[in-house]
Structures are given as structure tokens and as C-alpha cells.
Image (tube, helix red, strand yellow):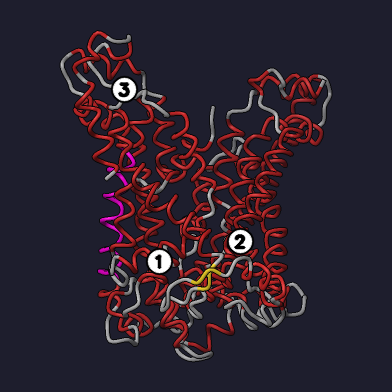
Amino acid sequence: MSQATVAKPVLGTQPGKKSGKRRSRLGESPYHGLLYITPWLIGFLVFTLYPIVASFYLSFTKYDLVSAPKFIGLDNYVRMFKDPVFRKALTVTFQYVIWEVPLKLAFSLFVAMILNMKLRGINFFRTAYYIPSILGSNVAIAVLWKFIFQTNGLVNQVLNLLGMPSVGWFGEQFPALITIVLLRVWEFGSTMVIFLAALKSLPQDVYEAASVDGCTKFRQFFRITIPLLSPTIFFNFVMQLIHAFQEFNAPYLITKGGPQKGTYLLPILIYENTFKYYKMGYAAAMSWILFIIIMIFTAFAFKGSKYWVFYSDDGKGAGEKDA
Amino acid sequence: MRNTEYNARTLARKRIKSVVLYVLLIFVAIVMLYPMVWLFGASFKNNAEIHSSIWFMPKSFSLQPYIDGWKTGSQYTMGHYFVNTFKIVIPRVIFTVISVTLTAYGFARFEFPFKKQLFALLIGTLLLPNIILRIPSYLMWNWFHLLDTYAPLTLPALFATDALFVFMLIQFFRGIPKELDEAARIDGCGRFMTLIRILVPVIKPAITSIALFSFMWTMNDFMGPLIFISSVEKYPITIALRMSMDATGAGYDENRIIAMSIVSLIPSIVVFMCAQSQFIDGITTGSVKG
């Protein structure tokens, strides 16, 4: 349908445009470009816009796939906040995000700083660090994690070797959550690579000037590197935030949400309501709440970015603040 | 005299510094890689040894875990599940490359009404949490009667649904001087032929990166097949692996599961090893603006 409506004007307007503006001096219709983005546009309407609208509508209904959706107003939303399982999942999700995002950012920035130094063989390390990220959420990685964190697994054996007692990683709520956090921190490669590219593009003369003025490496890091890197930190922060709130594979595969729902993140709750209990409306409402939470956090990040993110090209450079 | 002493001291300092850095680098490398090396070693061990040794080299070396693992314990072998995976991965990569290139070309090289707004929508989808789309997508494929087929996993790629790739490629297009396509057009090359003959050869590295990422993500995808594929016969390797994992009780042929995981990782690792730089550099082309 929309393909036809987009394609039509191209043929219709082409001849008349010949003597038109400069841009179309080669006899081109302004709709020509639309033709190329048509696949994406259709995809956007069918696979993005429609599902958003549909899930919004579904969230106000009761729908079990068998009988038609029944409109029940705000009932799903009201019920959700009375539901202890939902409240537990919400708490666990926040816990997870609060641990995972800063740890991953700090660790990947730290490693990127080391990799930015001019040492021989640095590319080997860069590649080595990147491997876990490329395998991402592969089920095999979940198998690996299950094995190395089990009671007499690799991690506990190393701890014993260092004279520390074993930890029942999957036996208690918080340690279980930490294993998931550690998995994602372990896969820090792609964030690290983005930091590394940004570090490589930092102007060296600022550092030289700072050294001449007797600024220590430590101060240089906080006064020069962090401000100059702030757009990249911000980008990585927002991306990680959005990912972390939607974490599903690791807890689903490794801990199955347990023990005592200690790793029962919201996406698992939504998944189970959708595909196990067929409570489509209720699940849609919960995904909307999660969506709104992510949007609020992203909006705050954007708002807050005014105070700490410096774009060196708009006159408010980091050097100015430093002075 | 004082000068040489000073030099010697800074040199010694520099050496100590680089030793410290190397120790740190190697330590991190061990943390990153040892679990995987250990897992590889464990796939040749017997079950008792898996639980007792942190050293990766197996004392008793056996290929039996691989032989058992390949049979998977279901009615199909791993070969069958691999074929299924490639039935998803290959169309998806091809569709993605074609649709993303066309869309990025449109955004990077043309002026058209509402371009700004449409581009904003494209960027918006980058930030959109996919979880919101999942239930209606499932219902939609249900109406089409295409659940339990590979259509939901492959067809959307025809419509450039990976906004990140489009964005990466637009950035790449912007780095190519417009004079290049204008020269081709003055020579009588049409807009589409300009793309195919002139621009595609130039953006080949970016297209390769996109193909590789798309390959990797589809290989690793778990959620997609979990939702859309329900019959064992059509399971890709990821879901088959989970099935065996869940079917295996504690202390029962664990080395077989480990061997299966190792085998399932082989395509991804081989592809990564052959094209490391495309992966590592490719990720930064789109995200970091100069």
C-alpha cells in the first residue's frame, strides 16, 4: 500500500522538475530519495510503530489469545502494583541496573585507558579482551557461567586457593545476581572499544600543556580526560542503561530467575506472563511500565548531561572549565 | 653528568611502569580468556575431573564427550541444528545488507520532504527498548500463520529493521566526497548504478562489518527463536543447546554439554578470528562522531 503511494509521485513529477532548483539539475524528483528509504519506512510502520500502538492498546485489555481482547481500563496497571511478584521483579531489576551499568562503564574505561598507552603487542590484548563480547548472549556462555560459578566450580576453587571460603553463588539471592552482573561486566569489549576510539582522538597538546604546568596524572584524568570524554561516557551510559533494563538471556538461562526470585528481572516476568500464562494484556502493561522507566532514566540522563557533558566544538570546551 | 643521571632515572621509571602495565594487561587477559580455555579443556575431561581441577589441561583425554554431544540426546544431531541456524543466519545477513545499504544511501545522498523528521525517527528507534514490540510482533506473526517458521526471524531484515546498521552506514557515506557520485552521474550513470558501481566498492569495509555483526548477532540470538520456533525439528543450535542443558541433571554427563557448547561456538569464533579488525573497528565507525 504505502509503497504505491510513495512510488507514484516519482513518475508524476519528474518531467516538470528539469528546470527546477539547483539540486535537481540532473532531472531528479525530490521523491527519488524516498524510494530508497521505502523498505525502512515500511519496516518502521509495520515492525515498530504498529507494535508500539498495539501494545499500548493491549495494556488496557484482558487478552488470552483465545477470546477477543476485552477492554478493562487501568485494571492491569492497578493490579500490577498490588502484585508482590511484580514488585519483587522491579526491585531486582533496579538492583541489577545499579550494579551492572557503573561497573561495566568504569571497568571498560579503565581498560581502554591502559590499551591507549603505546605498548608493544597492545593489539593482541585488545583482541583478547574483545572475544567474550562477541559471543554475547550465546547459550554456550551461559553454560560456561553455570559451570564456573557452581559450588566446586572454577571461581570457588580460585577463592580457596587464595585462602577465602567458597561462596554459594547460586544459593542466595544477592550472589546470584552478582554472577549475572559479572557476566555482563566480563563482556565489556564493545563499550571498551568505543572508549578507546574516543581516547585516541583526544588532543595531545592539552596534556602536554597540563604536564608543563605541573598537573599530576591523577588530576589530568579528572580535569581533562573525563570532561573531554564526557560525550562518549554519556553515549555508553545511555546505551548500557537501555540494555541493562532489558536483560533477559543471562538470568533466564543461568539462574532461571532464582533463587527465591533473586534474579527474576522484569523481562523474565513479562516473558512468562506472555508465553507461559498467556496474559497478553497484563504483560503488555508491564512492558509499558518498563518502557516508561527506561524513558524516564534516558530523559534524566539527557537532562543531566547539560551539566557534565562537554562538546568541545560548541565553544564550551573542557579546557575552559579547567582554567 | 646530572643530565645522564636524570635520563637513567626516567628510563628506569619508564621500564618499571611498562612492567606494571604488562602485568596488569596479562592479569586482565587471564580473567577474560581463562574461563573459556578452561571450558575447552573441560570438554575432554571426565565429569569427576571437571569438579576437582582448576587446571585446564585434562588428565584423562577423551573425545567421547564430543561424540556423545554431537548426538545431542534428541532425535537430531548437532549437524541438523546447525543447518537450521544457517537457514536463519544466511537469509538474514543478505537481507540486512541489501536493505540497510539502500536506506543509508537514501538518507545520506538525497533530499526529500520530511527527511529531518524521518531521520529523527530512525535515531529514535536506536533508543527504543525492543521489549515493547515483542508481544504485538508475536500476535502479528500469529495472524499471518507464520509462527514456527523462519519468517519472523528473517523477513523483518528485508526492511532495514536494524537502525544501528543504517546509522553506521550513513556515517560512512558522509565520509565519501559527493563529487565522486556527481562525476559518475555526469558520465551518465543513473542514481542506482552510481550506488552499485561507484559507492558500494568504496563502502565495502563498512558493509563487511555490518554483515559480520549481523551474522554474529543472529548466531547468538536466543530470544527470537525461543519465542517464534516451537517444534524441535526446526530448533536452531542455541535453543537445542538449552534443551540439552535443561534435560541434564546435576552431575550427569556435564562434559557432553560442555562439548556441545564448544562446538556451537566454533562458527562464531572462526568468523571472529578471520575478521577481527572489522569487528573491532567497525563498532566505532557509527558510534563515535569525530
- Residue bearing the label numbered 1: B138
At numbered mark 3, what does the secondary structure look like: helix, strand or loop? loop
Whether B74 is drawn above or below B208: the answer is: below
- Residue bearing the label numbered 3: A30
Whether A246 is drawn above or below A39: the answer is: below
Please give left or right for residue A59 compared with residue B147 in the image: right
Front-lying residue, B270 or B204: B204
Q: Is residue B87 magenta?
A: yes
Near mark 1 (Cα within 10 A), the count class, few <14, some 14-19 or many ≥20, is some
Dividing the image into 4 quarters, which one contains the N terminus of chain B?
Answer: top right
Tell me where the magenta segment starts and ends, as one range. Answer: B82-101
Q: Chain of mark 1?
A: B
- Residue bearing the label numbered 2: B31
Tell me how far mark 2 sits from mark 3, CA to CA.
55 Å
Magenta segment main secondary structure: helix
Whole-percent x and y of residue B58? 48, 79
Same subunit under labels 2 and 3? no
Tell me how far mark 3 sits from mark 1, CA to CA.
37 Å
At numbered mark 1, what does the secondary structure look like: helix, strand or loop? helix
Please give left or right for residue B220 compared with residue B83 in the image: right
Total numbered labels: 3
Q: Chain of mark 3?
A: A
Same subunit under labels 3 and 1? no
Q: Residue at x 35, y 45 (%)?
A: B160
Task: Give amino acid for label 2.
Answer: Val
Q: Is residue A157 magenta?
A: no
Task: Give amino acid for label 3.
Answer: Pro
Task: Give amino acid for label 1.
Answer: Tyr
